Image: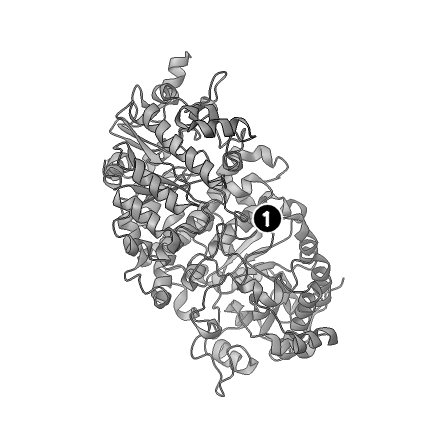
């Protein structure tokens, strides 16, 4: 097999879907700190050069360098820079010859784990400017996520105001391990800034909280941390519902990204049940939580965790909405085999919604 | 150690065991345990008092003592304080044959969790267990117990398990959902060794305790209640991947009140994660989902309530297809506000075999020590 053939075969859509597609989870990477030097103030470049800082710790905490979830085998380069660090590689791997009409980039570099507020804010500005210049302005098929450092919400809002109106940005990237659950009142101004610019708040795997990353201490092995990451998505949805974020920011839309969805119907049912029993505790939630969730929250379908087609179909039925599920390849971390299983499970009449229409509506593309 | 069977006044015939309720709550607070404490800690309570710091994370509860409003006794006695009223309101009214008491001593983690002197916590556990034996288990043969332990302290935990285990009316060891380290951590292994030795499942039950999430506190009781399953994801992954079940192949874990609709999807995620990351835990002997089927049990209350009734049957089908049909046990959570009445909580659309398994057969499988009690059939 030639390199070109290998690339074509590895394209997540190849031979699986030839209709319109919006890929909601493409994980472009900064690569090395030098990538950002042209976009940083000179003082910061000197400062970085004189320190030991090269990469935020969150990256290796959540994506151990050689772990199977960090890079799919077909994208590990034999030499040269890692996949998805350069536009040309992204184009050749993902967009051509038969790629998605639109690909939404999640450029997670772990900035939330940098506690130095000024350094982190400067790097966020640099990443956004790098993404605009190197990706968004070079290809009309690409859309991006605004990188912010959420532990300084006022600065995060300033950054959203600075770049949020660029037509390439469609969402703000939020790590699922936040400094406090995302529904909490301290974040409401941040979500208002996101929604006011027509952006979507997208919660993605990653992040480093101040304390242990579970309610029950520090896991010993990464596989415990990774496999049980669903626990944090669950906590975020519960917090968002309970604190009344949907009511406080009525035009807000939210994505859960990179967590799969077959676990979600059970949570929606539990929320509705507890709302019936405990709504006196959260009187600002005037309707069963499932209503706002189904209207304003979307979830990327992958990973499917090898669920058989009938289980996927049933989980979609249980969600109670055909508008919630989005396609996201997870390139270059995911192996790409999930799409076949997804299409086998999604009823034919709903496939174009999952592959493109739901995303177009959700992100107003 | 030899486990002794107890003489009970009324031996029960197997056909009477139609309903076993594996999660009920008797009230054991400071006033109840104080007379049973060592003098040193009685004096501590009299001159100083218990701090509440381990409960800082819990939001304001929505019901006094989390209880049904009708669960106070005729003279206003708090819910779960008096065995006679408890037996009348739960066992007689709902035709329940056996009930496992998960005492509030363990649910009040300001008494049992970290944040107090280690010896005080250990003595509270011992005193509470003695109170439970005398006031509750002796009162009615249908009442069965759970051993409270100072679970962060292996030495006293093992000693207390060894002290209580000869009383076969104790069926399990009671822990809160959240421990200071994930439960698979080796520092809890002495407890597992003792639990396995005495055929005592480790049962995790919600409690008022520290740290509700992996990213800070929650604000509302609603959030605490709706989010309960989250800690169980972490505990299940930890127990499996840290190799607890390879070292203790007969150990059984019960997850109480945390739901069960999440388990079958999570088994898929555990397996897929292991397929991608198994090099990190190369010594694991089985697929992760196999450990779930062999070592975990779940309770029904609060029962899952899908949008449509037929979806409950689908949910149960999914659970059964994952190999978990025999692992689901009826619980009422009496006397708490979200009590599930056995006549209504488990949908009649399930087959009679499935209902029978949930109401009694599965509990007989989980709690093998039931066979030590007179009149109880041995595990099928």
When asked about the image quadrant of residue A74, the answer is: top left
Task: Give the total number of marks visible in the rendering.
Answer: 1
Q: Which residue is drawn at 29% across and 34% down?
A: A169
Mark 1, residues whose alpha carbon is within 10 Å: few (<14), some, or many (≥20)? many
Image quarter in which the C terminus of chain A is found: top left
> For the view shown, which residue lies furthest in the top direction?
A2
Looking at the image, the residue that sits furthest to the front is: A43
Locate residue B183, reporting x and y percent: 60, 51
| Residue A287: image location, x then y, percent | 28, 60
Query: Farthest bottom residue?
Result: B75
Above or below, B193 relative to B3:
above
Q: Can residue B10 be seen in this view?
A: no
Q: Is residue A269 visible?
A: yes
Residue toward you, A148 or A354: A148
Q: Which residue sits furthest right?
A: B1
Image check: A58 left or right of A92? right
Residue at image mark 1? B239
Q: What element carries label 1?
A: helix
Question: In this orientation, which residue lies closer to the viewer: B286 or A42?
Answer: A42
Q: Quadrant of residue A201?
A: top left
């Amino acid at each position: 097999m030639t390199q070109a053939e290998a690339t074509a075969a590895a394209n997540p859509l190849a031979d699986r879907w030839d209709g319109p597609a919006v890929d909601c989870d493409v994980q472009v990477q900064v690569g090395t700190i030098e990538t950002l030097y042209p976009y940083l103030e000179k003082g910061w470049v000197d400062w970085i050069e004189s320190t030991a800082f090269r990469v935020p710790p969150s990256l290796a905490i959540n994506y151990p360098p050689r772990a199977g979830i960090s890079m799919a085998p077909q994208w590990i380069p034999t030499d040269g820079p890692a996949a998805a660090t350069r536009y040309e590689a992204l184009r050749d791997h993902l967009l051509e010859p038969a790629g998605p009409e639109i690909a939404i980039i999640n450029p997670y570099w772990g900035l939330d784990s940098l506690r130095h507020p000024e350094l982190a804010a400067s790097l966020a500005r640099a990443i956004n400017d790098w993404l605009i210049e190197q990706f968004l302005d070079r290809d009309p098929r690409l859309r991006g996520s605004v990188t912010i450092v959420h532990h300084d919400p006022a600065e995060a809002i300033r950054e959203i105001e600075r770049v949020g109106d660029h037509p390439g940005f469609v969402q703000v990237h939020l790590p699922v391990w936040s400094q406090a659950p995302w529904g909490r009142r301290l974040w409401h101004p941040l979500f208002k800034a996101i929604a006011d610019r027509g952006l979507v708040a997208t919660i993605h795997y990653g992040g480093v909280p101040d304390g242990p990353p579970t309610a029950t201490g520090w896991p010993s092995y990464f596989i415990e941390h990774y496999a049980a990451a669903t626990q944090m998505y669950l906590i975020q949805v519960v917090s968002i519902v309970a604190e009344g974020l949907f009511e406080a920011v009525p035009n807000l839309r939210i994505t859960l990204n990179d967590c799969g969805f077959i676990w979600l119907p059970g949570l929606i049912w539990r929320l509705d049940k507890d709302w019936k029993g405990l709504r006196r505790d959260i009187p600002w939630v005037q309707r069963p939580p499932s209503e706002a969730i189904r209207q304003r929250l979307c979830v990327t379908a992958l990973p499917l965790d090898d669920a058989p087609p009938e289980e996927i179909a049933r989980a979609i039925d249980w969600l109670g909405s055909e508008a919630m599920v989005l396609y996201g390849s997870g390139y270059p971390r995911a192996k790409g085999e999930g799409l076949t299983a997804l299409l086998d499970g999604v009823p034919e009449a709903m496939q174009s919604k999952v592959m493109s229409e739901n995303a177009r509506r959700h992100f107003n593309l | 150690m030899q486990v002794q069977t107890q003489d009970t006044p009324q031996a029960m015939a197997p056909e009477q065991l139609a309903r076993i309720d594996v999660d009920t709550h008797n009230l054991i607070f400071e006033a109840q345990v104080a007379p049973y404490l060592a003098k040193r800690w009685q004096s501590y309570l009299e001159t100083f008092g218990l701090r509440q710091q381990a409960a800082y994370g819990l939001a304001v509860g929505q019901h006094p003592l989390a209880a049904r409003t009708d669960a106070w006794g005729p003279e206003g006695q708090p819910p779960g304080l008096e065995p006679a009223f408890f037996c009348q309101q739960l066992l007689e009214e709902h035709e329940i044959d056996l009930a496992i008491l998960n005492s509030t001593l363990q649910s009040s983690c300001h008494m049992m969790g970290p944040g107090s002197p280690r010896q005080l916590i250990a003595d509270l556990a011992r005193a509470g267990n003695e109170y439970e034996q005398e006031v509750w288990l002796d009162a009615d043969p249908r009442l069965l117990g759970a051993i409270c332990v100072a679970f962060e302290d292996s030495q006293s935990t093992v000693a207390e398990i060894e002290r209580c285990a000869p009383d076969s009316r104790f069926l399990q060891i009671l822990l809160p959902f959240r421990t200071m380290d994930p439960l698979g951590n080796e520092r809890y292994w002495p407890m597992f060794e003792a639990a396995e030795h005495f055929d005592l499942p480790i049962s995790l039950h919600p409690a008022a305790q520290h740290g509700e999430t992996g990213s800070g506190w929650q604000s509302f009781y609603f959030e605490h209640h709706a989010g309960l399953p989250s800690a169980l994801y972490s505990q299940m992954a930890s127990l499996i991947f840290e190799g607890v079940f390879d070292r203790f192949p007969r150990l059984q874990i019960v997850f109480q009140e945390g739901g069960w609709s999440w388990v079958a999807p999570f088994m898929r995620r555990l397996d897929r994660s292991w397929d991608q990351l198994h090099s990190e835990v190369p010594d694991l002997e089985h697929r992760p989902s196999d450990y779930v089927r062999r070592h975990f049990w779940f309770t029904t209350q609060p029962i899952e309530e899908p949008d449509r009734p037929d979806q409950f049957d689908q949910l149960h089908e999914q659970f059964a297809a994952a190999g978990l049909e025999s692992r689901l046990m009826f619980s009422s959570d009496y006397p708490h506000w979200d009590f599930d009445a056995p006549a209504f909580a488990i949908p009649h659309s399930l087959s009679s075999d499935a209902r029978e398994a949930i109401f009694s057969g599965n509990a007989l499988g989980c709690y093998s020590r039931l066979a030590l009690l007179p009149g109880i059939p041995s595990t099928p």
